[in-house]
Amino acid sequence: MIHAEGVAEVTDTTFDGEVLGADLPVLVEFTADWCGPCRRLAPVLSSIAAEEAERIRIVQLDIDTNPVIVSRYAVLSAPTLMVFRSGEPVKSMVGARPKRRLLQELEDVLEPV
């Protein structure tokens, strides 16, 4: 899996605790090794994870090795970005995007500072 620096990896086993039980909103990137757009998104996610650590947590889930969660949230393509707040999915986006655009799309789900 393409690891974005500062971005934790979650699995079928750890998802509920790490994502659904989190205090902050959590952005989950559903990703895969073979996914070109996922590679382009990795530095964007690393940067946001570092800059917005007090407002949102970012994690990655490999769609090829975690079928339970992929199926639970009906993820059909990579990268899919899904934001969870208080255990519920509140936003979903498909495809890579530049940092500025992603931050704009996340503005309504980020914790206030």
Image: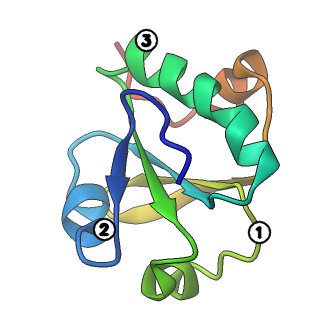
What is the spatial separation of the Cα atoms under label 2 and label 1, in whole angstroms?
19 Å
Precedes in sequence: disc 3 or disc 1: 3
What is the spatial separation of the Cα atoms under label 3 and label 1, in whole angstroms?
27 Å
Residue 104 in view, yes or no? yes
Q: Nearer the viewer, mark 3 or mark 1?
A: 1
- Residue type at mark 2 is Phe
Residue at image mark 1: 77
Asked if the residues shown at circle 3 and circle 2 are in contact, with their CB atoms under 8 angstroms apart, the answer is no
Q: Residues within 10 Å of mark 1 (few under 14, many from 20)?
A: some
Q: Considering the image in quadrants, where does the C terminus appear? A: top left
- Vertical side of 71 occupied by 41: above or below: above
Residue 107 in view, yes or no? no
Residue at image mark 3: 51
Q: Residue at x 75, y 56 (%)?
A: 35
Q: Label 2's element?
A: helix
Q: Nearer the viewer, residue 102 or 70?
A: 70
Residue at image mark 2: 15
Question: Residue 64 sits in which quadrant?
Answer: bottom right
- Residue type at mark 1 is Ser
Q: Label 1's element?
A: loop
What is the spatial separation of the Cα atoms under label 3 and label 2, in whole angstroms?
23 Å
User: Residue 107 at what x, y percent from top left?
Assistant: 59, 26
Q: Nearer the viewer, residue 96 or 83?
A: 96
Precedes in sequence: disc 2 or disc 1: 2
Asked if the residues shown at circle 2 and circle 1 are in contact, with their CB atoms under 8 angstroms apart, the answer is no
Question: Residue 13 sits in which quadrant?
Answer: bottom left
Q: Label 3's element?
A: helix
- Residue type at mark 3 is Glu
Q: Residue at x 60, y 24 (%)?
A: 43
Precedes in sequence: disc 3 or disc 2: 2
Please say which color scheme the image uses.
rainbow
Image position of 36 (left or right of 71): right
